Amino acid sequence: MGKAVNLKKRVASHFTGHKITPQRQHFLRDIHSISFEVCATELMALLLEYTEIKKLWPIYNTAHKRFEPKYGLYEYTARKGYRYLAVGEVSRLQPCIEVFGSVNEGVNFLRNLKDKFAFDYRFCKYAVTTESEGIPIKDQSDLPLIALHNELVHEAIEFVTEIKPSYYILDKGRNNNERSCIWVNESHFYGMGYIPYEEPITDPEQLKDFLTRYKSSSYIMQLISAFADKFPDKVNIPFKINQEF
């Protein structure tokens, strides 16, 4: 599974050369057919390559199999009624509020959140043992009022969820009769596809009818976010259509 500007040259490279290894011989032996899909932009090719590798899990593709968030931000309520925020390893059985590529990223995010909303540090769990928080974790004196503390945690969670943007990226199509679209819904990859130029679009939500849904991931959002930061003129907020595309 791979991408290339010159697909013929890329495919031919696998069948030429003097490097003979067992892995190469097995690779050539296992090829039965070749298929391809044209993408309008490099970003769409990157997204499609990643999603196809994740879906098909080809034996000879090692790249992209490691790009998964390792830690997440979780919320739970203890028996005494206090709400906790915790950074822990990602679990498929437990939904998390936010995901992080490393434990340090998660710890820093939670500490900044704690400072911003001024809730008690003792109700933050950082996935690692720490003695640098000033007061021993076992100290249960002068605990805040449950209702007041829980409201601060609620506001912090609301802040995290509300800062997740929704937008769509309009770019060139595979030909002059269409344009490409990548849609992000609340910081999650929704899908991508192509919209005919002659199609009358009055509501951005209509664009979704032309998109193929894909599963989002942390790596995919890194790619899209980096592109959006580099080309802000191609980013649209779903309130109105930019007719001057």
Image: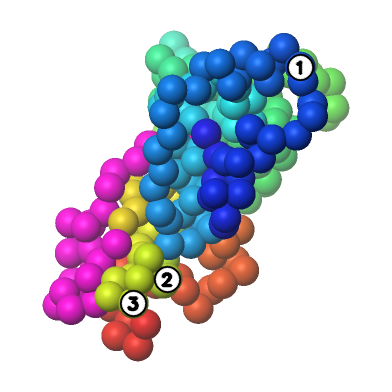
Q: Position of residue 77 (x, y in %)?
A: 44, 20
Query: Do the numbered discs 1 and 2 sit on residues whose CB atoms are within 8 Å?
Result: no
Nearer the observer: mark 2 or 3; the answer is: 3
- Mark carried by residue 176: 3
Which residue is depicted at the point 40% across and 38% down?
35
Q: Secondary structure at mark 3?
A: loop
Q: Amino acid at mark 3?
A: Asn
Q: Is residue 120 visible?
A: no
Between 31 and 178, the residue placed more toward the observer is 31
Q: Position of residue 73 (x, y in %)?
A: 54, 31
Which residue is depicted at the point 33% across and 82% down?
242
Q: Secondary structure at mark 2?
A: strand
User: Residue 70, located in which quarter of the rendered image?
Assistant: top right
Magenta segment:
194-219
Q: Amino acid at mark 2?
A: Asp
Q: Earlier in the sequence, mark 1 or mark 2?
A: 1
Name the residue at the bottom extreme.
244
Q: Amino acid at mark 1?
A: Thr
> Which residue is the site of mark 1?
21
For the residues marked 2 and 3, what is the alpha-carbon distance in whole angstroms? 11 Å
Number of residues whose C-alpha sits closer than 10 Å to that of mark 2, classed few (under 14), some (14–19) or many (20 or more) = some
> Which residue is the site of mark 2?
171
